[in-house]
Amino acid sequence: MDLNGTVAIVTGAARGIGRGIALELARAGANIVVADLPTVQEQMDETRALLEKEGVETLSVHCDVRDWAQVEAMRDAALERFQRIDVLVNNAGVIGVAFVVSMSEEEWDRIIDVNLKGTFLCSKAVIPHMMERRSGRIVNLSSQGGKRGNAGVAHYCTSKFGVIGFTQSLALELAGANVTVNAVCPGEVDSAMWQEHLLPALGGAQGKTPEEAWDAFIKERVPLGRPQTAEDIGQAVVFLCRADNITGESINVTGGSEMG
């Protein structure tokens, strides 16, 4: 698919990986629907300003991906503004750190609902339009944690394993309509998830500062010896959107820390 002049919805686009994906799609020529929560309006405005510097059209939409009515409204707003949706990137995601023995049911549901149910709802919303046009790209954000479990994040890993299974199943369902469905599995990206959740827990367990824990983790875990960036993830998304003959795949962007 030639992305010039296309329309892409990116959920969770206000900051971090979502912003990086939106920017890389814009640099490839796509107009962007920036979808995120009203609590991050300032970051949404920053993302939109950066996108407009790339010379593309943008639309900001508030959307909690767990809520079907809000997801439908996001889709309808995109169609009203642009009359088409070519790409959906299901990036919105959350994480928490807790062992299963002490994890609350509410915490389990929160992670599963955003990461997995949100991916389902947003995909369901755009599928009829893409099938009617016999063209479309859906890219889901999984994780290297969707290929290998880790202690303390069972709910997160479960949700991301589920995203990969959903990706494969939906790819089979939509292949006849010429709609591809793939996933990207980020590794160690210096994002809010790491800064606000993983590094404090990792550093605390090791008696290190978050910065020390991060440096040691990258050195020990990543063969290329450097973390990934939001732009790295965005470039993988652009590749999958351009690819006409790849579907059902889950591509690692991990610097070699996950090769399966």
Image: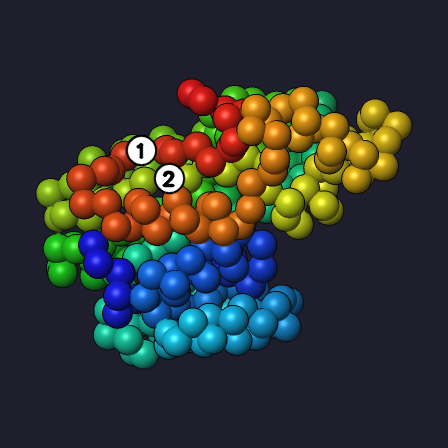
- For the residues bearing labels 1 and 2, Cβ distance under 8 angstroms: yes
Q: Amino acid at mark 1?
A: Glu
User: Dot 1, how many residues are within 10 Å of its Cα: few (below 14), some (14-19), or many (20+)?
Assistant: some
Where residue 259 appears, as percent x and y from the top left, is: 45, 22
- Residue 186 can be seen, yes or no: yes
State the image quarter where residue 105 is shown: top right
User: Would you name the residue on which mark 1 appears?
Assistant: 249
User: Would you name the residue on which mark 2 appears?
Assistant: 183
Where residue 156 appears, as percent x and y from the top left, is: 57, 35
Q: Is residue 135 left or right of residue 61?
A: left
In the image, is residue 164 above or below residue 14?
A: above
- Residue 65 can be seen, yes or no: no
Q: Amino acid at mark 2?
A: Ala
Q: Is residue 219 left or right of residue 56?
A: right
User: Dot 2, how many residues are within 10 Å of its Cα: few (below 14), some (14-19), or many (20+)?
Assistant: many
In the image, is residue 113 above or below residue 156?
A: below
Q: Going 21% across and 58% down the picture, which residue do you hit?
A: 2
Q: CA distance from mark 1 to mark 2?
A: 6 Å
What's the coloring here?
Answer: rainbow
| Quarter of the C terminus within the rendering | top left
**Helix, strand or loop status at disc 1:** loop
**Given the current orientation, which residue lies at the most extreme right position?**
207
State the image quarter where residue 96 is shown: top right
State the image quarter where residue 40 is shown: bottom right
Where residue 69 appears, as percent x and y from the top left, is: 42, 64
Where residue 158 appears, as percent x and y from the top left, is: 52, 30
Q: Going 32% across and 46% down the picture, which residue do you hit?
A: 239
Q: Going 56% across and 40% down the picture, which residue do you hit?
A: 228
218 or 100, which is in the foreground? 218
**Helix, strand or loop status at disc 2:** strand
Q: Going 45% across and 55% down the picture, which residue do you hit?
A: 21
Return the disc, 1 or 2, that comes first in the chain's sequence.
2
